[in-house]
Image (cartoon, rainbow, N blue to C red):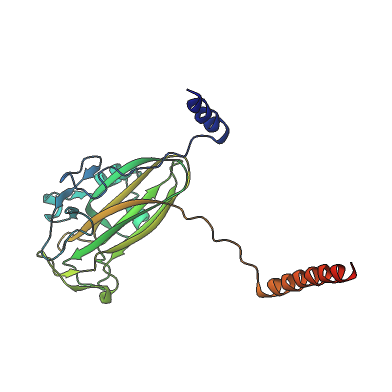
């Protein structure tokens, strides 16, 4: 039919629309980690004490309970999962990484998108304690293997914590982790995890939910400065006055 030919011709001229990257099982509503790679002690829950998902009815729960004899895995396994060279995790995180649990996913990107999600940190460490600064982290690796974004949530600032829930002594609010830019074509891999730092005697946990990919908003329109607007007004006024004079002369 003729309309099909027109559509084909239009696509040939304009090109196909960019493919949208997609996070599989972004709010863990399957009740599983389908679409995700995991290591350590990870599970999907519908609640944890008074903590509830920020989207839907499920959220991911990662923790370090059990020490080196439990489910959280020690540094060498974390390094292999993260693609780090053996013995480099301490330098990468700026701390003595003892053990942890991590989830990860690889997505194929085209165009420019912002990745966001929510997280809550829970811990039995004393907030403000150094060097026992357990932490949650997010890392985004671009198609060329470079670190494109990195963020942490930790125990350094006591004011960020309230009395805990779900068996934990302290907790932060469930809050956005930030917006992270994907603007290169190819495969991005992102990691979210929780780490025991310097010891395994006191554990920590991370609740994660609501991964969202949003298109990068267009730049705002250029607005003329007030001086430019006044000059424009003078110019338009001059043109208008000229038109009136020509009409009177006629």
How many numbered discs sit on the rendered protein?
0
Q: Which x, y percent locates residue 119? A: 26, 60
Q: Is residue 174 visible?
A: yes
Picture quadrant where residue 231 is located: bottom right
Q: Nearer the viewer, residue 185 or 102?
A: 185
For this rendering, which residue is in front, 208 or 214?
214
Residue nearest the observer in this picture, 74 or 195:
195
- Residue 67 vs residue 17: left or right? left
Image location of residue 132, percent across then percent down? 24, 66
**Residue drawn where x is 38% and y is 49% of the image:** 140
The residue drawn where x is 26% and y is 75% is 158
Residue 192, percent from left and from top: 29, 52
Quadrant for the C terminus in the image: bottom right
Above or below, comparing residue 134 to residue 14 in the picture: below
Q: Is residue 12 left or right of residue 80?
A: right
Against 239, is 119 above or below? above
Task: Identify the residue shown where x is 29% and y is 42%.
Answer: 80
Camera-side residue: 11 or 113?
Answer: 11
Occupied quadrant, residue 138 = bottom left
Residue 94 at least partly seen:
no
In-image side of 164 versus 186 (left or right): left
């Amino acid at each position: 039919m003729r309309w099909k030919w027109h559509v084909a011709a239009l696509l040939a001229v304009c090109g196909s629309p960019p493919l949208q990257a997609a996070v599989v099982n972004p709010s863990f509503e399957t009740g599983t980690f389908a679409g995700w790679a995991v290591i350590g002690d990870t599970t999907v829950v519908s609640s944890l004490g008074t903590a509830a998902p920020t989207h839907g009815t499920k959220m991911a729960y990662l923790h370090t309970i059990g020490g080196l004899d439990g489910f959280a895995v020690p540094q060498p396994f974390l390094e292999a999962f993260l693609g780090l060279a053996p013995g480099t995790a301490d330098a990468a995180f700026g701390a003595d990484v003892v053990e942890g649990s991590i989830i990860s996913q690889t997505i194929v990107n085209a165009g420019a998108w912002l990745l966001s999600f929510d997280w809550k940190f829970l811990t039995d460490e004393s907030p403000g304690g150094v060097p026992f600064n357990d932490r949650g982290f997010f890392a985004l690796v671009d198609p060329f293997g470079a670190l494109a974004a990195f963020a942490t949530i930790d125990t350094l600032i006591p004011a960020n914590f309230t009395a805990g829930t779900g068996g934990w002594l302290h907790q932060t609010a469930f809050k956005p982790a930030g917006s992270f830019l994907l603007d290169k074509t190819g495969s991005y891999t992102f990691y979210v995890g929780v780490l025991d730092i310097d010891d395994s005697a006191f554990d920590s946990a991370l609740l994660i939910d609501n991964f969202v990919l949003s298109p990068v908003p267009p730049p705002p329109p250029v607005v003329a400065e007030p001086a430019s607007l006044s000059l424009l007004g003078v110019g338009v006024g001059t043109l208008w006055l000229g038109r009136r004079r020509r009409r009177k002369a006629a």
